[in-house]
Image (spheres, helix red, strand yellow):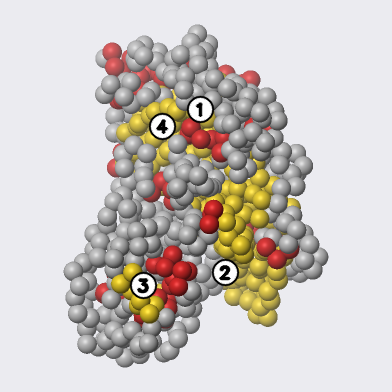
Amino acid sequence: MGFVMKLLNQLFFRKQSLFVLLVLAVTFSSVVVASAESPQASSESAANAFPTARRINVPYTALPVDGVYHLPAISLSSNFWFGTINETTNFTDVRMIYNDTTLFVHVNVYDRWLWYNEEPGTEPLTNWDSASLYINTAGATGGSPSATTHQFVAQFGPDDWVRGRRDLYQYGFQGNGSDYVPSAAPFTTHSYYRGEGGPNSGLENRGWWVTYQIPFSSLGVSRPADGTQWGLAMVVNDKDTATGGTAMTFWPEALNGHAPATWGQLSFGEIQYQAPVVTNPQTVRIQNGVDGGVMVDAHVGGHTNCGDAEENPTFWTPENPNPGLPFPDIYNGWPNRNRAGFQQINVQNQVDVVDWPCYSRYYIQVPLNPVPAGKQIVSAKMTFYQFGNGGLGYNAAYGSFIRAYTLAQPWDENTITWNNAPMALENLNGTWVESLDPVTYPNYYANPPLPRTLDVSKAVADFYATGQPLNLAIWSADAPPHSGKYFYSVELDDPQYRPVLEIVYGDGQGSASPPPAAAPAQPAAPAAPAAPSAPVSAGLTYTIQPGDTLSVVARKTGFSLGQILNANPSLTNPNLIFVGQVINLPGSSASLPAPVAPAPATNAGEVVQPAPTAPPAAAPVAAPSSGGSTYVVQPGNTLSIIARRVGTSLRELLNLNPQLENPNVIYPGQTLNTP
């Protein structure tokens, strides 16, 4: 009975706090509180419709997910953000991903002062630094908490400090038609902090994080089908002194925890743009200052130097809060700095909250008037030119899965800052951007820069239909440090390396057939193309299945990886395929051998190469061409690095080495054929 009373006490205090929040209409930065009686629209939208509420499209993963940080899959997650940074307010970055059984949520809170209850059970969890996650499996609908409505409260409390009592720092609730009551549905949380001061000390820190693992079975459902939409909301409570109260920030702006119709949307699976059938297709390229093209961009945050003044590389510490910065400190200056006019921009994030002064987010607006009125958008891609990345001096640099996000609010290049920059309306699909090989690109500098392309078809179609300029943010959900990616801005002196938007449009005739199932978020799963590429010859086709890699497909069908790539010239990266994608197979009449089970996944998400087997006679592997050279694999090499070093393409390198069933599995000392 005592445990139940504690839960009810927690519920009572939470309801009081939310009621006061709504009545007083407290405002935190761009988070503007609306009346509880004016919920946002939350009706389900068609596949290509502009969302009417804030939405996160959450990717599926088949990668391993650890129980604390949610690595390595968290780097491929989707995220949304809210709040501001100063001495007494917090910024929150929320990342989400799911697998067959569980929804994973990672909440990073940039917070200067950290407090948790050292005697759990004596006060409501929300009286301290904490996060409350709201989920409604029936969608963002309804004016009261129903049985499909859940709330998961997790108080900050360092895992090793609470000494195995983590269960006392989390409570679950479920709606009963009019209110929330305690729920015994199991879920798991973990929490920790970063900073020099430590919690409950009154000294400065960088922030804290909490991770959720919520089994679908605890919500009374199985893994949701792609396109399923739930209601979603998040509240973060902030306590800044030992005796003071808490303040709230939350997502979305009009949140009323007891009215799911005011919540945002969680949509399962990546976006699949349904391209229309058109006649008279045309292509237009928009590039700032080229043929009348106009683009405006900006970036907020740490730029490429973690916010330090260029003349003083000293990094901020609690003992030295003003290391030569051209503003007071990172809590009052960094978030409010405008970076208009920069020719170089950075896109960076990290799972470790300690380095948030290094994080940087990019914004770009593009008027779409070069596309004539009354047209249908078939596809659109935005290309940025990468000249460098983080990691210099640390002997480490990592790839990034970079996403585009649509924005509903305008912004001004000359006034935008971290604290006033718009929140995301909806995340789009992303692309994997590798770090630069320091051997090929000394000091991580590429000249000429490398093109990196994002599929923004849905965003362009959405904004074009409303007559508005394309309005995007570009960010990532990286896990490792030194993951910043440096690109040239629209103000670069050399116009050829400014960002470029390429749009294919035409006269509409109707809609194409429904797109394939959404892609699992494997390492760099791309957006689905508008249609599969035409076969090189009148060959067979194969539809990608869950768990497939190109190496697995090659083994299933009896072809070499090089032959598969030759039959699919649109596949520029053998790691980038998605479930439901149709690829071409060489030949026209050979029957397929019996399927072979995929190999098990390693902790790194790669496929373990099985013992070599002879290929079927129906699909002989071509011998490497004579007269070529060889290369001995060195430590740190990948096939992509080797291809650049020897001056060839990855496709050609695989053609010359048909013995390589998996392009990710090579080892030092191995000899490869080269042109």
Q: Counting residues from the N terminus, which is met first, the one under dot 3 or under dot 1? A: 1
Instruction: Identify the disc placed on residue 635.
Output: none
Say what amino acid the circle numbered 1 marks: Arg
Query: Which of the two labelled residues, at mark 2 and mark 1, occupies the earlier sequence position?
Result: 1
Q: Which residue is mark 4?
A: 210
Residue at 27% across, 57% down: 601
Q: Which label sits on residue 206?
A: 1
Task: First in sequence, mark 2 or 3: give its number.
Answer: 2
Instruction: Give the alpha-carbon distance from disc 3 to disc 1, as whole Å.
Output: 47 Å
- Compare residues 189 and 465 and report the one nearer the observer: 189
- Bin the neighbour count of mark 2 within 10 Å (Cα to Cα): few under 14, some 14-19, many 20 and up: many
Q: Position of residue 167 (x, y in %)?
A: 30, 25
In the rendered structure, find residue 631 and report the number of the disc placed on it: 3
Asked whether, in this view, residue 626 is left or right of residue 248, the answer is: left
Give the quadrant of residue 589: bottom left
Is residue 6 found left or right of 315 in the rendered image? left
Q: CA distance from mark 2 to mark 3?
A: 44 Å
Q: Nearer the viewer, residue 672 or 170?
A: 672
Question: Residue 180: image x %, image y %?
Answer: 41, 27
Q: Quadrant of the N terminus?
A: top left
Residue 506 visible in image: yes
Please, is residue 11 above or below residue 575 in the view?
A: above
Q: Name which residue type carries label 4.
A: Val
- The tag on residue 275 is 2
* Disc 2 versus disc 3: nearer the observer: 3
Local crowd at mark 3 within 10 Å, few (<14), some, or many (≥20)?
A: some
Of badges 4 and 2, the one in the foreground is 4
Instruction: Using the numbered discs, state the Cα–Cα distance from disc 3 to disc 4 in whole angstroms.
Output: 47 Å
Indicate left or right for 528 with 623 as reference.
right
